[in-house]
Amino acid sequence: MTLPAPHDKANTVRAMFARIALRYDLMNHLMTFGCDRSWQREVVRRAAPPPGGRLLDIGCGTGGIAKEAWGRDPSLEITAADFTLAMLQRGCNGAWRQRLRWCGADALSLPFADDTFDAVTSGYLIRNVTDIHQALAEQCRVAKPGARIVCLDTAPPGRHPLKPLIDFHMHRVIPLVGGVVSGDPLAYRYLPQSTRAFKTPEELADAMRTAGLVAVAYQRRMFNTVTIIYGRVPVSDVEDAARG
Ligand SMILES: C[S@@+](CC[C@H](N)C(=O)[O-])C[C@H]1O[C@@H](n2cnc3c(N)ncnc32)[C@H](O)[C@@H]1O
């Protein structure tokens, strides 16, 4: 599979997630060796919304990060937003329908007013959007001054002693297992290909600074193939000017 052309990307991505929605969580669990939950916990910990605050999880899929945030603090007002209906439908079952505000939304044009949220999170969204800068700009716009913005995503592994093993897992094991589990091998070929073509954590950090965030930093996980990257919306014009 070649990566979709930019003008096709949004439709291709939406259709792909609609096809794999049913088995998405199971497959995530399998290919991360069960680490997905601990990364979601770390995203929520880094987002650190205040009690009773508003959190937006954009590109929420089945709502893993949003559910983790609710589990940590049920006083939060959590909006779980995505542009793939099938993923939202899969996530908002049972009690989750009421606990979270599920919302259809495009990350590139968020249907929220400026300065709405105390924290914004996303998991594996940024690699999938057609315009990373626009997605980050929108997250900054809807976040209040001082809010944290946290992105979890895969990353090109770069130089690593275990690179042959990592490549084998990404380019052979994941498409094979993903094909069997989800019935859609193409989707699980797109994952390693889009990861290889994606920004390094340093480049993503630069994009977050360009979007206006301060105190940008990141952590790497799973042999550098996963990054949790975070920054804060400046609280004042002085802080904004200080970032240069
Ligand atoms: C890999 S899934 C991640 C789901 C979830 N965040 C997680 O951590 O497991 C990526 C999600 O991003 C959504 N997505 C991609 N581009 C989007 C966009 N422009 N606007 C809203 N959602 C988008 C897809 O529909 C999909 O549900």
Image (cartoon, helix red, strand yellow):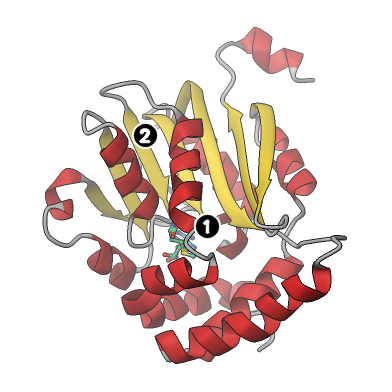
Q: Residue at x 38, y 68 (%)?
A: 25
Mark 2 neighbour density, 10 Å: few (under 14) some (14–19) many (20 or more): few
Q: Is residue 174 above or below residue 134?
A: below
Q: Residue at x 84, y 60 (%)?
A: 160
- On the rendering, which quadrant does ligand 1 occupy? bottom left
Q: Position of residue 180 (x, y in %)?
A: 46, 91
Amino acid type at circle 1 is: Leu
The one nearer the camera, 238 or 178, is: 178
Q: Position of residue 190 (x, y in %)?
A: 61, 79
Of pointers 1 and 2, the one earlier in the residue sequence: 2
The one nearer the camera, 224 or 98, is: 224
The residue that mark 1 highlights is 125
Q: How many marks?
A: 2
Mark 1 neighbour density, 10 Å: few (under 14) some (14–19) many (20 or more): many
Q: Position of residue 111 (x, y in %)?
A: 35, 46
**Location of the C terminus (image quadrant):** top right
> Disc 2 on helix, strand or loop?
loop
Q: Which mark is residue 158?
A: none
Q: Is mark 1 within 8 Å of ligand 1?
A: yes
> Disc 1 on helix, strand or loop?
loop
Q: Residue at x 64, y 29 (%)?
A: 213
Camera sees residue 175: yes
Amino acid type at circle 2 is: Ala
Quarter holding residue 68: top left
Q: Is residue 74 above or below residue 83?
A: above
Q: Position of residue 94 (x, y in %)?
A: 12, 59
Q: Is residue 72 left or right of residue 47?
A: left
The residue that mark 2 highlights is 113
Q: Is residue 172 left or right of residue 85?
A: right
Q: Is residue 163 left or right of residue 135?
A: right
Q: Is mark 2 within 8 Å of ligand 1?
A: no
